[in-house]
Image (cartoon, helix red, strand yellow):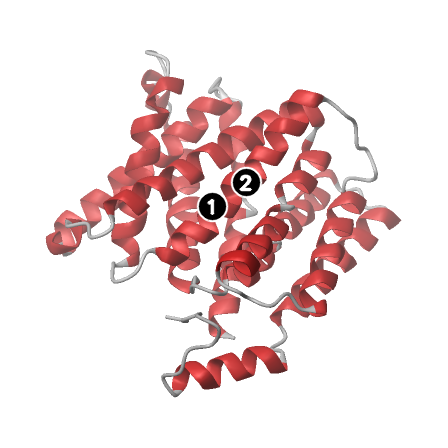
Amino acid sequence: MKDKLVVILSGILWGFVGVVTTQILKYNFSTYAVVELRFLISAIILFIGLVIFNKKLLKPKNLAKCFLLGLSNLFTCVCYYNSIKYLGSAFASVLLYTSPIMVMAYCTIKNKTPITAQMIISVLCCFLGCVLFGKGKIGFNIKGLVFGLLSAVFNSAVSIVGAKIKNQNKITINFYSFLSASVVGLVFLRANTFTKLYNLKASLLFLLLCVFCTIIPYILYISALKQGQESVASLLCISEPITANIIQIIIEKQISITSILGLVFLILGVILISIKTKAESQINVKVSTGQNFKGRQLT
């Protein structure tokens, strides 16, 4: 239960990304620049922290997987922003949160993880909740559809790859994943991007984005990931759009029946997947006694 609450908390912190990013964009940063600087500054902060407090943690053990994790994070953001550009945030969020379906499919095929009725109902509730929160304003654009589905694919990879990285400090994992994302993401930066950081308010907003909306939630999420439970973690991250939409309602001071229904379905989806099932209890018993459960191992 503790791991589930940690994942929900990480989703809540990610839910503030939209409102903080909106404020940053007012200082003439492109969305690509925001994505790149988000990971670059986060990597720098973690590097400074590791140098000061524990240099030994700078030694990576799973560099290739950390690199894949970083690319997954980077391209999730890039594809999601492009999906919003062509489809709007409502449909883009619906497509992004098809990722739990992809993760469940992977876990079923690869890890022989059983898909329960509880998980299916939870996915349907979350999907319907996203649609209702968007007030049914769903348009169609082939580019937006491709970017939206790709954002879901890369978002799925974050859960899958993250769960496979073992015997490595979680801060180290995130440092190298952020570093990988920032190095690859340099192609999105223009020469004058860094000069805009001289604005104190813009710099403080980036600091807020990096510390509270990137470093903390990513470390929490990766620390809670367990191989064989990727689908559950992916579903619980629906707390991100719940938070984002509640913030939007507060800012716009507008609420509708469809928004309320959407919120109800989203919360219902989170509650359903948070309840420990009989099958999950059996898995935990198997693990605690050192037995394998259909090839799965929760670590």
The x and y percentages for residue 215 are 37, 48
Q: Which residue is mark 2?
A: 153
Q: Which mark is residue 197?
A: none
Quick one: 192 or 171, which is closer to the camera?
171
Marks 2,1: beta carbons within 8 A: yes
Q: Residue at x 62, y 41 (%)?
A: 96
Q: Secondary structure at mark 1?
A: helix
Q: Quadrant of the C terminus?
A: bottom left
Total marks in image: 2
10 Å crowding of disc 1: few (<14), some (14-19), many (20+): many
Q: Is residue 198 above or below residue 220?
A: above
Q: Which residue is mark 1?
A: 157
Q: Residue at x 40, y 85 (%)?
A: 288
The x and y percentages for residue 183 are 29, 28
Q: Secondary structure at mark 2?
A: helix
**Callout 2 amino acid:** Val
Q: What is the quadrant of residue 92 in the picture?
A: top right
Q: Is residue 276 above or below residue 221?
A: below
Q: Is residue 33 above or below residue 217?
A: above
The x and y percentages for residue 139 are 79, 27
Furthest residue in direction right, as rendered: 257
